[in-house]
Amino acid sequence: MGDYKNIYSGVDFGLEPNYGDNFLGFDYRFPSSVFGVPTDPRTANQIKAVSDKLNTGAKVIEVTAITPEVLDYIPDQHLDELNRLRELAGVELTFHGPLVEPTGITKQGWDETDRQEAERQMFSAVDRAHKINPKGNVVVTFHSSNGLPEPETRVFNSDTGKEEITEIMVVDEREGNFNKVKPKKDYLLGKNDPYAEIARNNEEAWFRTLQHLNFNAEQGSRSLDYAFNQSLKSVSQPGEKRKGEEEILKLYKSYVNGDESKLNVFKDLSPEVKEQLQQITYGDIYIRDAYRNLQNSYNQAYEAAKRINNQEDIKKLEKFRDELAPKVKDIEDPSKIRELSGEITKAVSVLRSIKPPEIQRPLRQFAVDKSSETFANVAFKAFQEHGESAPIISIENPPAGSGLSRASDLKEVVDASRKKFVRKAIESGMSESEAKSQAEKLIGVTWDVGHINMIRKLGYNENTLIKETKTVAPYVKHIHLSDNFGLEHTELPMGMGNVPIKKHLAELQKKYGDKLKDIKQIVETGGWYQHFKITPMVETLSAFGSPVYAMKMAPYWNQARSTYGGYFAGYGQMLPEGNFSIYGAGFSGLPPELGGQMGGKNRLSGAPIE
């Protein structure tokens, strides 16, 4: 009869050459206890949400509080009750914290107070999450960003086979403003380095700043020189030059301060003296404007030197500051405008001798710095509060196209967070080795394979995806599972899109070996249920070929799920629907005398009682 195909799956298993296969093969037959499900993030009634998931038989449940307002609606007593429920059911709970921007960047720009507010909000979530498992290190997931624009627009050029940066976001840290820089090719040197262009822009901006400072100081000095040279014409005796300057400056001070006792004197001044006062006023305006700009430029230069720990520049700047400090009081005196002009000139020469500060700082660098500060502070404070049972801060990659969504971004954020945690711990008296151990334990990554798959829409292929997982593998504490086709955030069950999950897992297994099964994997497929009204767990367990029973042997879910195909009813002989209606866990199937609704039916057969 030649080749034949079954119309229904689940028929003639003995004749199926590939019976028992699943798309992952036999290498990743994870038991169902590895997989978890998230609760409904829209409700604050997480007790019911967790109970509903327990009724499905789930062994790992992620309490989801991604909306700050919903999280604040959950009473502490409910979190305590979730802990009791966890112990009673023998399950494991994880926690998804609220979606906040850890850098403190908002639509209005950046401000340190916004970062501190985000930090307080995140710590509150971590502190409260500890209640659902006070004796264990509950995993608390936060996104690496929420609302942060992509710091670098990177695309894959299929013609050259290389990744290219087409646009870079930069930030003025002192002002909190953002701009875009598009790389321009240097045809003279044949280079196309966007970061070199930013450095060049910073040098040019710093030069213009100092040039403006110098111009104002010089213009002010010229006006003063003109005024004092004019005063020489009224000096008749040799040696009275100094006295003339002092007198005119004292007069100017009274003039500026509006000294009423001198008003009549001002009225009686000669036109020549009035012109002198006017010239000194012009000079004063230029010089004090230069002084205000000098203060901003000095602060910017000092902050930049401190950030990169440039000790040579720091010493130069501190030396100038120490020399200037005793003179500041006198400088504010209008009669000391000459001295102020001299100090500005000296300051310009100091600022010229240091490394130009990063007026335009790459947003990626800035975001890593600020977000790592937040994560480190939250982790360290949680450790101070809860010690060895402190929650684990697990940083998740948001959907590709968002800020800090690539593996290299997460790696840098985690490394920077751990370093800052270690520094704080050592300062508090902990040994360096213990500090490093706690940092590695308490700060890691939640790797979302569906989110990273969305770089496909930028031209990347499967090989790049695997490199991403290879980069982040040493930091992974937690996994989120969802499938898609690399274009939209669709959250399909695994095996229904083009996420190369087998290759992802192969990279993770190189790092963790058999311990990979200890890393919990949360099935995030909310959209699937929305559209198809069926649980995604059957599809997920089938995709991984998970064993049906606790003995971790055949039959497997990829075999069992097919048994209904040839039987035309419910879940077939394995899980007949009639059993659920008669012997289900609910009370509706009990006889009326036991509180049920099965009046007039036989409890065993369900047939009408005559």
Image (cartoon, rainbow, N blue to C red):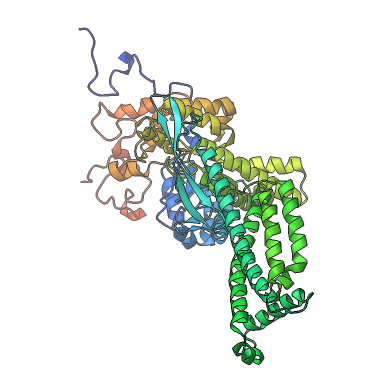
For the point 45% across and 37% down, the residue is 184
Q: In the figure, is residue 462 to the left or right of 410?
A: left
Residue extending furthest toward the right: 239
Q: In the figure, is residue 181 to the left or right of 119?
A: left
Rendered image quadrant of residue 456 = top left
Residue extending furthest toward the top: 1
Tell me, yes or no, if residue 138 can be seen here.
no
Return the residue nearer the eye: 300 or 345: 345
For the point 65% across and 69% down, the residue is 224
Question: Which x, y percent locates residue 177?
Answer: 49, 55
Question: Which x, y percent locates residue 545?
Answer: 42, 27
Tell me, yes or no, if residue 238 can be seen here.
yes
Return the residue nearer the eye: 478 or 137: 478
Rendered image quadrant of residue 603 = top left
Return the residue nearer the eye: 121 or 96: 121
Q: In the figure, is residue 483 to the left or right of 348?
A: left
For the point 69% across and 67% down, the residue is 340
Above or below: residue 425 compared with residue 152 = below
Q: Quadrant of the N terminus?
A: top left
For the point 71% across and 58% down, the residue is 346
Question: Which x, y percent locates residue 258?
Answer: 62, 85
Question: Which x, y percent locates residue 141?
Answer: 52, 46
Return the residue nearer the eye: 170 or 20: 170
